[in-house]
Amino acid sequence: MSSTHEKLIRMANQIASFFATQPGDKGAASTAQHIRDFWDPSMIAQLAELIKAEDNGLNPMALAAAKDVVGA
């Protein structure tokens, strides 16, 4: 895995950790919205590739958010 992918994974997991205290599935929705608002399209495209891997390193909330963002 490239260092760029590792950085995206770390960033997505950090964002998800920040929103983890929100009730229900609001944390994943807030994480997805943050990614939509602040990540450029090339980062989102790389995220789409990452979620195809079974062992991608994303925590469950970050993975749910990523799938929401890319429509997977």
Image (spheres, helix red, strand yellow):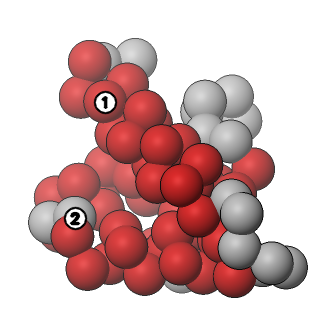
| Mark 2 or 1, nearer chain start | 1
Q: Amino acid at mark 1?
A: Lys
**Is any atom of residue 53 visible in this view?**
no
Q: Which residue is mark 1?
A: 7
Element at label 1: helix
The image shows residue 27, relative to residue 52, as above or below, that is: below
Q: Amino acid at mark 2?
A: Trp
Residue 15 relative to residue 52: left or right: left
Q: Which residue is mark 2?
A: 39
On the image, the x and y values in percent for residue 42 come to: 16, 58
On the image, the x and y values in percent for residue 13 come to: 53, 43
Most foreground residue, 22 or 4: 22
Q: Residue at x 43, y 81 (%)?
A: 33
Quadrant holding the N terminus: top left
For label 1, count other residues whose C-alpha is less than 10 Å away and answer few (under 14), some (14-19) or many (20+): few
Q: Residue at x 24, y 28 (%)?
A: 4
Quadrant holding the C terminus: bottom right
Q: CA distance from mark 2 to mark 1?
A: 13 Å
